[in-house]
Amino acid sequence: QVQLVQSGAEVKKPGASVKVSCKASGYTFTSYGISWVRQAPGQGLEWMGWISAYNGNTNYAQKLQGRVTMTTDTSTSTAYMELRSLRSDDTAVYYCAREVFGVVMRAMDVWGKGTTVTVSS
Amino acid sequence: IQLTQSPSSLSASVGDRVTITCRASQGISSYLAWYQQKPGKAPKLLIYAASTLQSGVPSRFSGSGSGTDFTLTISSLQPEDFATYYCQQLNSYLLTFGGGTKVEIK
């Protein structure tokens, strides 16, 4: 079945970097994009950015420009999200999601279970 | 593009009809999706293209609207529907979510 499996929880100190992985299975990886969405404790959903698994093109949310990098490894059908210069307000659950961006259907139709990233000194 | 959801929370009883609205700061055609999220779980896609039900989603869920004003309706609220609902615009390559609507038991 189609699924996205994310890496485990991380605890980082302020100023450090974190890299979260998202392994896809059950579909042709390069036919879709991957979006990353985060959710701070008790807060709503925040879109972080998107990467095309076909050609590696990216779009990032303006507030994260310069701190976030999204990549893919098509040989292992895995997407990665690296966030640098971590601050306490980066503490959140980070989700990857398969993104369909067609003429008719545009949505995030498959989601990973989330990776908790805690930033604390 | 900003999305404003209302209300931010509501209390309802099983069997009630529930309507949630989502307003975009500029026109987004019909590129709007709705998601349901339960505590500790990932969001689940309910509706895309403003009104198309995702496969497997119960028919008591429906969506409508285009341009800037959209609604999500649950025709008869069931116990498993108590959750938080988010709208999302996908008109541009920079996506945004609404602030969410928490549906609680009255």
Image: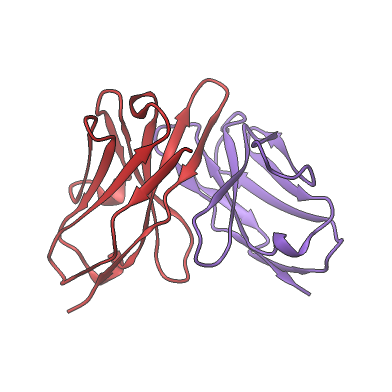
The reply, left or right, for residue A68 in relation to residue B14 is left
Q: Is residue A8 above or below residue A82?
A: below
Q: Residue at x 31, y 46 (%)?
A: A22
Seen from this angle, which residue lies furthest bottom?
A: A121
The answer to whether residue B1 of the structure is visible from this angle is no
Q: Quadrant of residue A73?
A: top left
Looking at the picture, tell me which residue is in the foreground, B46 or A90: B46
Seen from this angle, which residue lies furthest top?
A: A103
Q: Quadrant of residue B9?
A: bottom right
| Figure chain in purple | B
| Figure chain in red | A
How far from the left and from the top, in percent, is residue A104?
A: 57, 23
Looking at the picture, tell me which residue is in the foreground, A101 or B31: A101
The reply, left or right, for residue A12 in relation to residue A8 is left
The reply, left or right, for residue A101 in relation to residue A60 is right
How far from the left and from the top, in percent, is residue B52?
A: 68, 32
Q: Quadrant of the C terminus of chain B?
A: bottom right
Q: Residue at x 39, y 66 (%)?
A: A40
